Amino acid sequence: MTVTSTPEAKFFTVRSTEGKKYLLRYDERADEWTLQSGFDGDALLARPSIELISVEPKAIPEAESKIAGCESCRPEQADIPFDRILADVLDKRGPFEFLLTEAARCPNCRADLSEKSLVEPQGGMKTEDSVRT
């Protein structure tokens, strides 16, 4: 299990018995657990207190350049959602959901990326595992 921390929450990458990866999120301030995976449009809009941010086309290549691979080509290393990279590129923190205005692709295997695709960061984003080594 991989643990990633932000000021808002701790994220645990977990795998189902079918082999699918999910993000288990613990918000310490609210003492709340949520299971995150891809949302369809209706489910996303139904979430309260979430601001939707359109990711402009010029920001997508910058976000792509910050990842080494994705859940398709590096399933064991991909442990954070692509929207965490987008938040870093756009300097957005808080209850945001990002909507890509153009397709994003993994720079390693060229697989399509959604906002919730799991990726391996190229560098600059620390997880608790990388701090311990």
Image (cartoon, grey):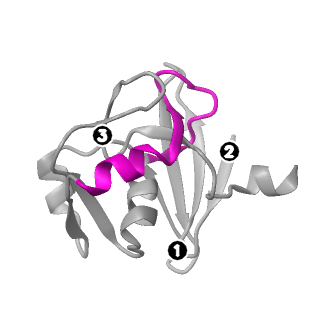
Q: Is residue 76 magenta?
A: yes
Q: Which residues are magenta?
A: 58-81
Label 3 sits on a secondary structure element that is loop
The image's mark for residue 2 is: 2
In this orientation, which residue lies closer to the viewer: 12 or 108?
A: 108
Q: Earlier in the sequence, mark 1 or mark 2?
A: 2
Residue 84 vertical placement versus 27 (above, below): above
Q: What is the number of callouts on the image?
A: 3
C-alpha distance separating marks 1 and 2: 17 Å
Q: In the image, residue 60 lies at what x, y percent?
A: 30, 50
User: Which-is-in-front pick, marks 2 and 3?
Assistant: 3
Relative placement, left or right, of 15 versus 84 is right
Q: Is residue 16 magenta?
A: no
Disc on res. 114: 3
Residue 44 shown left or right of residue 69 in the figure: left
Label 3 neighbour load within 10 Å: few <14, some 14-19, many 20+? some
- Asked where in the image residue 116 lies, by quadrant, the reply is top left
Between 25 and 131, the residue placed more toward the observer is 131
Identify the residue shown where x is 58% and y is 75%: 7
Q: Which badge, 3 or 1, is on the more N-terminal residue? A: 1
Q: Which residue is mark 1?
A: 8
Q: Quadrant of residue 52?
A: bottom left
